[in-house]
Structures are given as C-alpha cells and as structure tokens.
Amino acid sequence: MERIEVHESSGNVFTDLGLPDAEERYAKALISRTIAKEIDARGLTQAEAAELLGTTQPKVSAVVRGQLSGFSMDRLFRFLTALGMDVRVEVQPAETNTQGHLLVSTR
C-alpha cells in the first residue's frame, strides 16, 4: 500500500502551492467571489453587469471565473463600489516585528 503524505493547509491555497504574491492572489479571489455573488443575487446577466461596472462582458466573465491576473485590486474595488458595496481599507502595525500581511474580510 502506497503511503500518501498529507500536509495541513495554511488557509491560503496560493501559499500552499508556493505561488508568488499568494496573499494578493487570495485577496483577489475573495473579492471576485463577492462580486460574483452580488451579480448572481441581483439576477444580472454578464452583459448587464458589464454595463453597470463600466467594462465588457468578457471581463465580467473573467472575474466571475476567477481569472484575475489582468485585474488590479483598485479595479476590483471599483467593481464592488459600482455594485453598491462599501470598501474599507484599514492599515495598522503588524502584530509582530515581521513583515505585515494583506487580509480581506467579506460579509
């Protein structure tokens, strides 16, 4: 029987995969999920969402599918505000003397 090695997750799949900019990738994923949920909750088509967001339907499709490499955090924030959501950025000292972290909290 072959042994399978199991590792506990850090909570961020991008970190676990060793990808660069893992915190930003994870934050964008959470934001895109929020955008997709709001589009769905409003019953919008991607074309209707694109008009509301001031973008194209293919761009909405990319966000909804989590293909976010061409999107800045600022652009995703603008999409959230266009959907009637408040975005709050809070900056505070890190809890330890190490490098700070990027955290996103959604409701």
Image: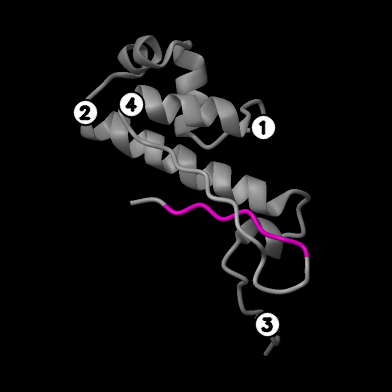
State whether the magenta stretch is mostly helix, strand or loop: loop
- The residue indicated by pointer 1 is 69
Task: Tell which of 93 and 10 is nearer to you.
Answer: 93
Mark 2 — residue? 42
Find residue 60 and report its image quarter.
top left
Q: Of label 4 and label 1, which has the lower sequence position?
A: 1
**Residue receiving disc 4:** 83
> Where's residue 40, x and y in %?
27, 32
Label 3 sits on a secondary structure element that is loop
Q: Is residue 24 on the magenta stretch?
A: no
Residue at far bottom of view: 1
Q: Dot 1, crowdedness within 10 Å: few (<14), some or many (≥20)?
A: few
Of mark 4 and mark 3, the one earlier in the sequence is: 3
For the record, the magenta segment spans 99-105
Answer with mark 2 or mark 3, whichever residue precedes in sequence: 3
The three-letter amino acid code for the residue at tag 4 is Leu
Give the number of the disc on residue 4: 3
Which residue is found at the position 41% from the left and 16% from the top? 53
Residue at figure coordinates x 69%, y 65% from the top left: 16
Q: Secondary structure at mark 2?
A: loop
SS class, disc 4: loop
Q: Amino acid at mark 2?
A: Arg
What amino acid is at disc 3?
Answer: Ile
Judge whether residue 103 is colored magenta. Answer: yes
In which image quadrant can residue 81 be found? top left
- Of residues 91 and 38, the one nearer the viewer is 91
67 shown above or below 61: below
Q: Residue at x 61, y 73 (%)?
A: 9
